[in-house]
């Protein structure tokens, strides 16, 4: 590696030290930042230029992922793999979130359909009608006739009655399911289930985890709109909160302290700029 000019290195060190001592609000004010964000979102020329680059970058990443046959497990270290599994297993779901999800109409309808299928299949396989007819003093064609009539008349009636019953029972079934999921005695079982799910996901090829092209196109468009639009309903209020909490904090608290090699890389980049035509007159020690 070429040596870095001493003057350039001192300049970089001085700039680094100065920046670390600056407070966030000394570098940019809340109103200024809000105005900068507004100007950025309204700069149609910038977004028009950036959209093709964004889509091209998205396409490259998506193509790479769709061609990736290795599993996530093969891409991460053993230590990271175990930490992910331990984290997924240890994180308990929020009870209110569980209740909100399981009480949704879609879950209630799905549970009602599962219960209906189970009840109907039981009645069909148990052949309750056949057992009743077997006790009747009829044989041969008469028995078949009776069975056909019972099947045609009773099964639709039973189907309607079962669905009517489940229409009022599904809500109670959901409440019982919530109690089961959140019960302390079942916690270990669900922890083990979450770990098995994480193992399954991490051991699948990366390409199989991606949704279809239509879904990823919607994700891409949604991500682009999120970049263009304000992230929060009351952005000014969030900025006020952020500056009240962090405006007095200096960059030293957030900045990484680079080691010698990283500082050399930054100094070489600065030296190349100062040695180029654009930066020659700005180099440290330049006269005039």
Image (cartoon, rainbow, N blue to C red):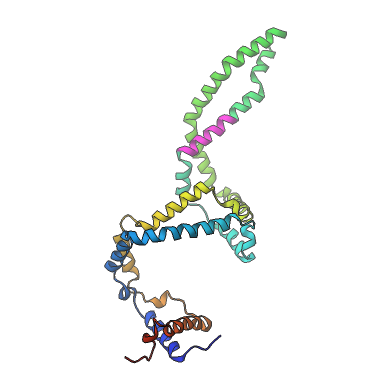
Q: How many marks?
A: 0
Q: Residue at x 57, y 58 (%)?
A: 64
Q: Residue at x 66, y 21 (%)?
A: 127
Q: Residue at x 49, y 36 (%)?
A: 108
* Magenta-drawn stretch contains 111: yes
- In the depicted view, which residue is nearer to us: 85 or 215? 215
- Residue 192 position (above or below residue 34): above
- Residue 213 position (above or below residue 252): above
* Residue 139 seen: no
Q: Which residues are magenta?
A: 105-117
* Magenta-drawn stretch contains 231: no
In the rendered view, does 207 fall on the left or right side of 50?
A: right
- In the depicted view, which residue is nearer to us: 72 or 288? 288
Q: Quadrant of the C terminus?
A: bottom left
- Residue 103 position (above or below residue 203): above
Q: Residue at x 52, y 36 (%)?
A: 110
Residue 97 image offset from top left, x and y in percent: 46, 48
Residue 72 image offset from top left, x and y in percent: 61, 59
Q: Quadrant of residue 129?
A: top right
- In the depicted view, which residue is nearer to us: 279 or 80? 279
* Residue 53 seen: yes
Residue 116 image offset from top left, x and y in percent: 56, 29
């Amino acid at each position: 590696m070429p040596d870095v000019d001493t003057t350039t290195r001192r300049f970089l060190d001085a700039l680094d030290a100065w920046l670390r001592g600056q407070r966030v609000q000394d570098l940019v004010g809340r109103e200024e930042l809000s105005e900068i964000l507004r100007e950025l979102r309204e700069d149609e020329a910038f977004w028009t230029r950036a959209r093709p680059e964004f889509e091209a970058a998205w396409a490259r990443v998506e193509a790479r992922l769709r061609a990736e046959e290795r599993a996530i497990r093969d891409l991460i270290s053993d230590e990271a793999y175990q930490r992910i599994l331990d984290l997924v297993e240890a994180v308990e779901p929020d009870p209110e979130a569980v209740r909100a999800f399981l009480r949704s109409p879609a879950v209630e309808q799905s549970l009602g359909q599962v219960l209906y299928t189970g009840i109907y299949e039981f009645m069909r396989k148990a052949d309750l009608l056949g057992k009743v007819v077997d006790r009747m003093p009829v044989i041969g064609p008469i028995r078949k006739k009776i069975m056909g009539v019972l099947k045609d008349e009773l099964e639709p009636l039973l189907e309607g009655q079962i669905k009517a019953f489940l229409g009022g029972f599904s809500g109670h079934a959901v409440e019982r399911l919530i109690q089961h999921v959140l019960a302390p005695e079942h916690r270990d079982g669900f922890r083990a289930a979450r770990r098995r799910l994480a193992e399954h996901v991490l051991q699948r090829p990366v390409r199989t985890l991606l949704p279809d092209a239509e879904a990823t196109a919607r994700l891409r468009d949604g991500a682009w709109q999120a970049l263009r639009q304000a992230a929060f309903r009351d952005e000014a209020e969030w900025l006020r909160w952020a500056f009240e909490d962090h405006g007095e904090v200096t960059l030293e608290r957030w900045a990484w302290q680079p080691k010698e090699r990283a500082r050399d890389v930054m100094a070489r980049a600065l030296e190349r700029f100062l040695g180029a035509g654009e930066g020659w007159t700005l180099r440290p020690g330049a006269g005039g």
